[in-house]
Amino acid sequence: AKIDIKGVESQFVGLSKEELMKYANDPFWVRLRMTLFVLFWVLWLAMLVGAVAIIVLTPRCAPPPRLAWWQSSPVYSVDVDTYSDSNKDGRGDIAGLTSKLEYIKQLGMRTLLLSDIFAKDASGAVTDYLEVHSSLGTLADVEALLNSTKEKDLHVVLEINPAYTSTDHQWFLDSSEGKDGFQDIYIWEQGDEASPPDGVMASGESAWTYNAALKAFYLHQTSLDSADINWKSPKALELFTGVLRFWLERGVSGFLVSHTYLDHAPVLKQATFATEQDVLGVLKEWRQVLGNYSSTHETEHRVLGVRVDKAASEAKPLYGSSDELAADLVLSKPFEQLVGKPGAASLRGFVQETLDVTPEGMWPSFVLGSASSSRLKERAGMLLDGLHMVAALVQGTPVFYNGDELALECPAKQCIMPWAEEGADNPVV
């Protein structure tokens, strides 16, 4: 008897062996299988060829640009007279700096920016661009420093003031005597001693001093013991070209122009280093001097920088243009614009503004500290470590002021580096 069990459905168990064999040798299914097999391999080979074609024909990504030495590492700005004292006279010196090069290299710094080391008078005006200030050492000490930095793959950049010299400088003495070729390298104005031209210094004193021998006034916008260079004089360019070549021959890797009158107000109409065009003209001339030296001596690029007390957006024209290059690095105001409690927003603003205003094709720099500002620790506070990290990672050349790596805090803007003990390679941290 047939028994129906409700609720139980029959399950499909597939084809039996006999049923499969029935179709295994069927001509239609044989052709279908062969067609699909061939089609699979044709499509696989087509994809392989296509992938190879894409790899071969697709334009390659441009290799990352090779950075110059002044772009690939931080700059360590050093005040030599407060860094390391080798002869125990209470002031830092060149020999002391030389003894600490290993420490500087361990910091990851590859470029040393030396503050004005030239011979100068009590007011700070240069008396000789070819000599070293006696308190810092001798020319032989500088040559020893340059030889040591070369051995350690470090570079030295000198800060130089081309705006004015001391009245004790031989150039001024020659000019004040009317020596042939030197008459116009300073700014002279004919006139009566009782009627000086208009213009005063920041102190309120007249910016003009009378020379009885020439019956003319010379301009000095900084101090009574200085005299302003006339950058409209071809002789001035010739003399400074000689200065640049003198130091290049000894192994200096570049120069930082400082003490422009761009930061001064009001600007006297007779000044020749006070407008953007004035400074640009000098930078372009010096850029050619350095470029020609590198080409003729087949050496690496010699860097040219300029320091101005302006925001990055105001200083950007000093880069020049792609057709007429001027400064490689423009050191604008340091990170000192923070008000209240510094934070990530202020840091981001500082970095972003600098990147945004740097002209296309030029290289930005981030000045974190300088002798003209308070210590970075005092300005950045808890942001100090983050600031160092960001500066090291962001595209651009960070400029660190010596001692800021230790978070030094000093009542004065300049303070002696606290070396642990006599002869120690590392300072107290």
Image: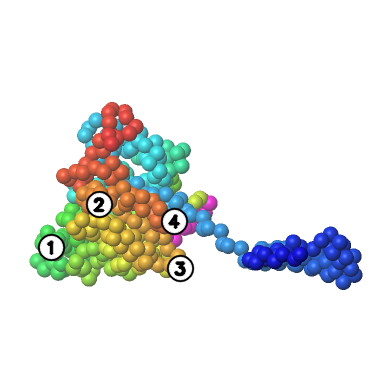
Mark 3 or mark 2, earlier in chain: 3
Residue depth check, mark 1 versus mark 3: number of the one nearer the observer = 3
Q: Is residue 59 left or right of residue 111?
A: right
User: Image quadrant of residue 204?
Assistant: bottom left
Mark 2, secondary structure of its residue: helix
- Disc 4 marks which amino acid? Leu
User: Image quadrant of residue 62?
Assistant: bottom right
Q: Is residue 236 left or right of residue 123?
A: right
The residue carrying mark 2 is 380
Q: Are marks 1 and 3 in contact (CB under 8 Å)?
A: no
Residue at 33%, 69% in the rendered image: 277
Residue depth check, mark 3 versus mark 2: number of the one nearer the observer = 2
Residue depth check, mark 2 versus mark 1: number of the one nearer the observer = 2
Mark 1 or mark 3, earlier in chain: 1
Q: Where 348 sits versus 91, above or below?
A: below
Secondary structure mainly formed by the magenta segment: helix
Mark 4, secondary structure of its residue: helix
User: Image quadrant of residue 417?
Assistant: top left
